[in-house]
Image (cartoon, rainbow, N blue to C red):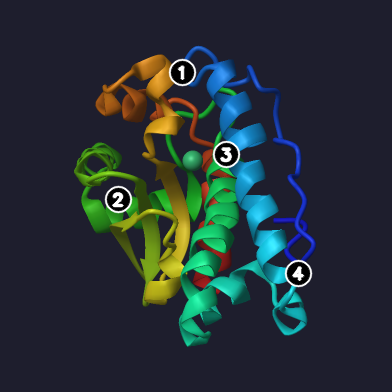
Amino acid sequence: MENTYYPFINLPLPYDYDALEPFIDTKTMHLHHDKHLQTYIDNLNALLKNYPNLQKLSLQQLIQTANTLPTDIQQPLRNNAGGVFNHRFYFDLLANPSEDVPTGPLAAKIIQTFGSFELFKAAFTKAALSVFGSGYAWLVLDNNRLSIITTANQNTPFELCMYPILTIDVWEHAYYLKHYNLRKNYIENWFKVVNWTQAKKNYLAAAT
Ligand code: MN3
């Protein structure tokens, strides 16, 4: 992930806005990246403007130290640093429909942990459906074990000392324009555009 220090900029998507059609629509990608993520970037920069010491911390360090900071900055920092990290992480994990399943060491670990890729997919879908309100479902590495968790709002796995490998944004803005209230359809379509090469990279980075 580039641009990990203040001032934060909204990096372009690593693919065209229409690259995920027909599974995730162009209009949603424009709004999600250009409006929603932009707002988190702007709010995070505005927040850090008056805290020179915090400007020296990376995005991940900001998230990891948020709960040690004064209460007036703690929650806005968690929301906005989390909002920037989570969206970049989510967007980087999408790609033109090409790969159906993970390969290599991540595939082996998924099969070892969940029994099969299909069982993993069912468990991940169930978790993503279980998020009440706004949040994310994650595949994480927790003490070298794969685990599926959910987080509310813009919370991240870092606050739980876990390392993210894969995530789906299940805030309604991620799917409502195309899938309306049918989150399950969105999850099924999202699985068709997962960038498993990036997930594998995240796994190898987390495992070291
Ligand atoms: Mn979002």
In this picture, residue 132 sits left or right of residue 67: left
Packing grade of label 1 (10 A; few <14, some 14-19, many >=20) is many
Residue at the image point whose x is 19% and y is 44% from the top: 130
> How far is the residue under mark 2 from the one under mark 3?
35 Å
> How far is the residue under mark 1 from the one under mark 3?
20 Å
Element marked by disc 4 = loop
* Mark 3 lies within 8 Å of ligand 1 (Cβ measured): yes
Q: Amino acid at mark 3?
A: His
Is the C-beta separation of discs 1 and 3 under 8 Å?
A: no
Mark seen at residue 36: 3
Q: Quadrant of the rendered structure where residue 178 is?
A: top left
Mark seen at residue 49: 4
> How far is the residue under mark 4 from the one under mark 1?
38 Å
> How far is the residue under mark 3 from the one under mark 4?
20 Å
Q: Nearer the viewer, residue 83 or 198?
A: 83
Mark seen at residue 199: none
Q: Quadrant of the rendered structure where residue 2 is?
A: bottom right
Going from N to C along the chain, the mark reached first, 1 or 3, is: 1
The image shows residue 97, relative to residue 2, as above or below, that is above
> How far is the residue under mark 2 from the one under mark 4?
46 Å
Q: How many numbered discs?
A: 4
Q: Nearer the viewer, mark 2 or mark 1?
A: 1
Quadrant housing the C terminus: bottom right
In this picture, residue 88 sits left or right of residue 66: right
Going from N to C along the chain, the mark reached first, 2 or 1, is: 1
Residue that mark 1 sits on: 23
The image shows residue 19, relative to residue 51, as above or below, that is above
Q: Is residue 183 visible to the viewer in this orientation of the structure? A: yes
Q: Nearer the viewer, residue 5 or 35?
A: 35
Residue that mark 2 sits on: 111
> How far is the residue under mark 2 from the one under mark 1?
26 Å
